[in-house]
Amino acid sequence: MEALVSPELGFIVIFLAALFLFGEFLVRAKGLFGLIGCLLFVYYFAYHLTNQSSTYVVGLLIAGIVLIIIDGKLLVNGSVAAVGLLLMIISCALPAPTFFYGTLVSIAFIIGVSCSFFFLKYMPRKMYWSKLLLKDQLSTEKGYNSINESYQFLVGKEGIATTPFRPVGTIKIEGKLYSAVTNGVWIESESKIKVISVDGTKILIEKI
């Protein structure tokens, strides 16, 4: 563990920890990536933390992870996840023994998170990542209407949720499929819905 006195090794450990932990958020790795990432973080913090700093530093790290999970499960827009990322970067930099060491591990964290997106090219992606990209909802090959169309005529119409809403999903109205969103409310598949407003191509629905 004494090897972590070297900033270069600290860089490698945090790079790999961020790479695998965020790879777990993005792709279906069956928990393996998450385990590797968590063990590397434990290795890093076990060396650098002191009794005085351990509580709030670990708190920042956990808070950052929780915010990223909340964004992925509920909001699916990346705004809260960005705050979570910032908290995690701060938690890695604070216990570093020097400013240079802290800067280096912060850069390593950012690079690791960025490189984790390469996993999306080779492994099945998590469901909420597909929702964030709206890949399935906007695919014309699957019967979805073009995003260039105006959907104002749908206001007030009723239909069926063909997928669960968390809060993005798909609805069927008069035999056609549309991507839609709720006002933060979860709706189960096959629920009856009603279109309450349309803003450009954003269709807002509610359960009836």
Image (cartoon, rainbow, N blue to C red):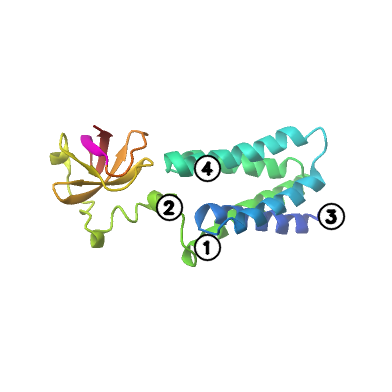
- Camera-side mark, 4 or 1: 4
Is 15 magenta? The answer is no
- The image position of residue 80, as x and y in percent, is 50, 38
Label annotation for residue 119: 1
Measured Cα–Cα span from mark 2 to mark 3: 37 Å
| Circles 1 and 3: CB atoms closer than 8 Å | no
Answer with mark 2 or mark 3, whichever residue precedes in sequence. Answer: 3
Say which residue appears at 81% left-offset and 54% top-offset. 4
Element under disc 1: helix
Given the image, on which type of amino acid does mark 4 rest? Ile
From the image, tell me which residue sits under label 4: 69
Query: What residue span does the magenta drawing correspond to?
Result: 191-198
Measured Cα–Cα span from mark 4 to mark 1: 18 Å
Measured Cα–Cα span from mark 1 to mark 3: 29 Å
Element under disc 4: helix
Say which residue appears at 31% left-offset and 44% top-offset. 189
Say which residue appears at 47% left-offset and 40% top-offset. 79
Given the image, on which type of amino acid does mark 2 rest? Met
Answer with mark 2 or mark 4, whichever residue precedes in sequence. Answer: 4
From the image, tell me which residue sits under label 2: 127
